[in-house]
Image (cartoon, rainbow, N blue to C red):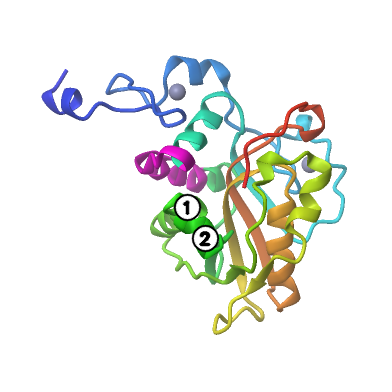
Amino acid sequence: MKLKHILFPKRCRCCGDVILPWDNYCKVCIDENTYITGETCTHCGTKKEDCICKKAYLPYDRITAAYYYEGGVRRGVYLLKFYKNIRSAEAMAEDMYLSYGREGINFDYDFISFVPQTKDEQTNRGFNQAQLLANLLSVYCSIPTYNALEKLYSSKPQRSLRASFRKGNVFGIFDTRKGVEIQNKRILLVDDVRTTGATLDECAKMLKIHGADTVDVIVYACTKSIETRKKPIDKN
Ligand SMILES: [Zn+2]
Ligand SMILES: [Zn+2]
């Protein structure tokens, strides 16, 4: 093993645990097999066989997710959001980029945007993980990132609420930012995780109301099935 691998050990792309230099994931994360492959549902981002969304109306046009929000992926998101494990965000953005290759679709957008935070929320956390992922993804696909949305009020963390309350918690709290041209634009909206989809729905709705031609969503991870979960889960 080389000295640089001892000084700067390679870390699992999901959970951030130290791994051997020639691996990309730790054994635990490989065994959990959360990577989404094959045919997927463009409404909820899950594998076709896992989809229970019944293709209800959604404000965005399609969604792509790299992983299920489980196991090491969940640990990785937690470390990013609450321990500022910024390095793991680079691997996350790369996996989001690669998920488009898996779907056989192109990054055909005018710009990338992201789920915003209020000033207070950003001050408390120190950074917006969705903005960080958007900026990193922008480098991979050579499309500019614009801060097209603003969050008008702070809200209770979605993770603290049961699924049935989440829609009301974010209703009407986003708007488009003045000075950003939305009309007829093809926009890729970025977030770290989709659980109930209430936050992404609300953001996409505002972009569409202001004339966006296309709003596609890309997330690092999505939940397999919200209905089967008993406890509130971790999501902004
Ligand atoms: Zn891992
Ligand atoms: Zn579905």
Q: Give how far across and how far down residue 90 sits, in percent.
A: 38, 44
Which residue appears at 78% of the width and 29% of the height? 49
Which residue appears at 54% of the width and 72% of the height? 110
Which sits in the foreground, 110 or 133?
133
Which sits in the foreground, 171 or 32?
171
Packing grade of label 1 (10 A; few <14, some 14-19, many >=20) is few
Q: Are marks 1 and 2 in contact (CB under 8 Å)?
A: yes
Q: Is residue 131 visible?
A: no
Highlighted magenta segment, given as a residue range: 81-98
Q: Give how far across and how far down residue 121 sits, in percent.
A: 53, 56
Q: Is residue 94 one of those drawn in magenta?
A: yes
Residue type at mark 1 is: Asn
Q: Is residue 210 left or right of residue 167?
A: left
Q: Is residue 56 left or right of residue 125?
A: right
Which residue appears at 57% of the width and 41% of the height? 102
Q: Is residue 44 visible?
A: yes
Cα separation, mark 1 vs mark 2, equals 6 Å
The numbered dot on residue 41 is: none
CB at disc 1 and ligand 1 closer than 8 Å: no
The numbered dot on residue 124 is: 1
> Quick check: 18 above or below 87?
above
Q: Give how far across and how far down residue 98 sits, in percent.
A: 49, 44
CB at disc 2 and ligand 1 closer than 8 Å: no
Residue farthest to the left, as pictured = 3
Residue type at mark 2 is: Asp
Task: Report helix, strand or loop for mark 2.
Answer: helix
Q: Is residue 85 left or right of residue 99?
A: left
Q: State the residue position of label 2.
A: 120
Task: Report helix, strand or loop for mark 1.
Answer: helix
